[in-house]
Image: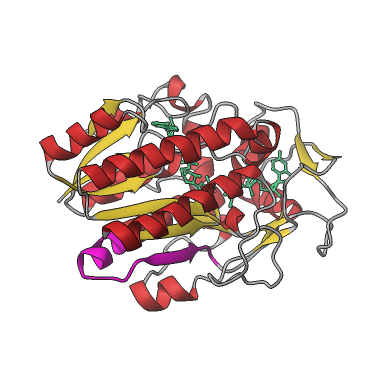
Amino acid sequence: MHILVTGGAGYIGSHTVQELLRAGYRVTVLDNLSRGHMAVAQVLDGAEFVWGDIADRELVVGLVRSRGIQAVLHFAALSLVGESMAEPSLYYHNNVVKGLSLLEAVREAEVPYFIFSSTAAVYGEPVQVPIEEDHPLAPTNPYGATKLAFEEALRWYGAAYGIKYVSLRYFNASGADPEGGLGEDHQPETHLIPLVLQAALGLRPEVTVFGTDYPTPDGTCIRDYIHVTDLAEAHVLALRALEGGLVSGAYNLGNERGYSVREVVEVARRVTGRDFPVVEGARRPGDPAVLVASSRRIREELGWRPRYGDLETIVRTAWEWHRRHPEGYEGGT
Ligand SMILES: NC(=O)c1ccc[n+]([C@@H]2O[C@H](COP(=O)([O-])OP(=O)(O)OC[C@H]3O[C@@H](n4cnc5c(N)ncnc54)[C@H](O)[C@@H]3O)[C@@H](O)[C@H]2O)c1
Ligand SMILES: O=c1ccn([C@@H]2O[C@H](COP(=O)(O)OP(=O)(O)O[C@H]3O[C@H](CO)[C@@H](O)[C@H](O)[C@H]3O)[C@@H](O)[C@H]2O)c(=O)[nH]1
């Protein structure tokens, strides 16, 4: 089966392309490189890379028809909570307007299967933890709102046009390919674990804790960190399940265990054996206090089992990559 992966030059998309290739799928990546890395193509040399935009409907329809594509895995998006609060227009345009254009191309070319990268941010501030899939959907930031808008469009397109889909609601993706070829490299970096590791490498003077007055045991935000390879494997499972007749729907993906910002810093100090300055700062607008998943549904229905579930392992795999690629992909693969 031939798969189109949008955003496959980015962090989670590239790790998923690797798992798809290992599982024997043929893969074409579509990425406009607005946030991704051409160097990923050297690591994933079994995949075809096409430089283009998801909103280029003619290009997408042409790729689907010429390659006989049967499934689209849609990672391409802007995905930073803070940036979305400052620039909602960017987020509505890229994630919703361009996303809908992609969906139109998928409908026109009659692609049967679709997997969407959704997010814990669709839930907003949890009314109960761990969060199950039927938790109210009330995003607290434009990023989550745009992801929810696309999820809903997909649901209605699925019902009306017969597209079989899965929306995977990831919690905090982290870690790096344990075999060392792929890692996390965002420019600028805003994610906690790579920032902490860059501080441990001496590439940043300090780490700032965003908010110490949250209603949590140590006052800092709690998140559920999930290894990127475990996420990637969930896509392969979801794809196989769709091929086997799975009913469309949404699944959470997290480790069902929350860590505070301070706990992440402590784990990073232990794993790296290095100390670095940590300063306390203001809250970052749009951040919910606690996000912890229940992944019961995907475990029970698709048999998903995380292989790299504990935070030390997650941070260790990320550390291995950052140590070898202090300047990210631009420093060479
Ligand atoms: N990183 C996380 O913790 C996390 C958590 C939940 C959900 N997600 C979702 O997972 C997906 C991937 O996240 P990531 O961290 O790998 O992000 P990323 O920025 O590393 O990758 C996104 C890729 O999409 C590409 N892209 C963006 N807009 C495009 C467009 N219009 N046309 C073509 N390509 C385009 C970028 O160039 C980039 O390579 C996103 O949809 C994100 O919302 C991420
Ligand atoms: O310098 C920093 C960076 C982050 N944080 C905190 O660390 C936590 C994690 O932040 P970050 O790594 O930026 O991830 P999130 O903002 O939680 O968002 C990620 O996880 C979401 C799902 O939970 C996804 O939807 C998003 O795409 C993805 O970026 C948050 O509480 C931040 O406030 C800090 O305290 N200091």
Q: What residue sits 46% from the left and 36% below the top?
A: 97
Residue 253 lies left or right of residue 63; in this view the side is right
Closer to us: 124 or 48? 124
Query: What residue sits 63% from the left and 65% below the top?
Result: 292
Report x, y in % for residue 139.
65, 54
Q: Position of residue 59 (x, y in %)?
A: 24, 28
User: Magenta region: which residues?
Assistant: 236-255
Q: Residue at x 28, y 40 (%)?
A: 105
- The answer to which image quadrant residue 89 occupies is top right
Q: Residue at x 43, y 26 (%)?
A: 329
Examine the image and state in which quarter residue 124 appears. bottom right
Figure coloring: secondary structure
Decide if residue 152 is on the left or right side of residue 202: left
Query: Where residue 183 sits: x, y (%)?
Result: 45, 38
Image: 174 above or below 327: below
Q: Is residue 3 above or below residue 288?
A: above
Confirm whether the magenta stretch covers residue 237. yes
Q: Position of residue 34 (x, y in %)?
A: 46, 25
Is residue 184 shown to the viewer in this render? no
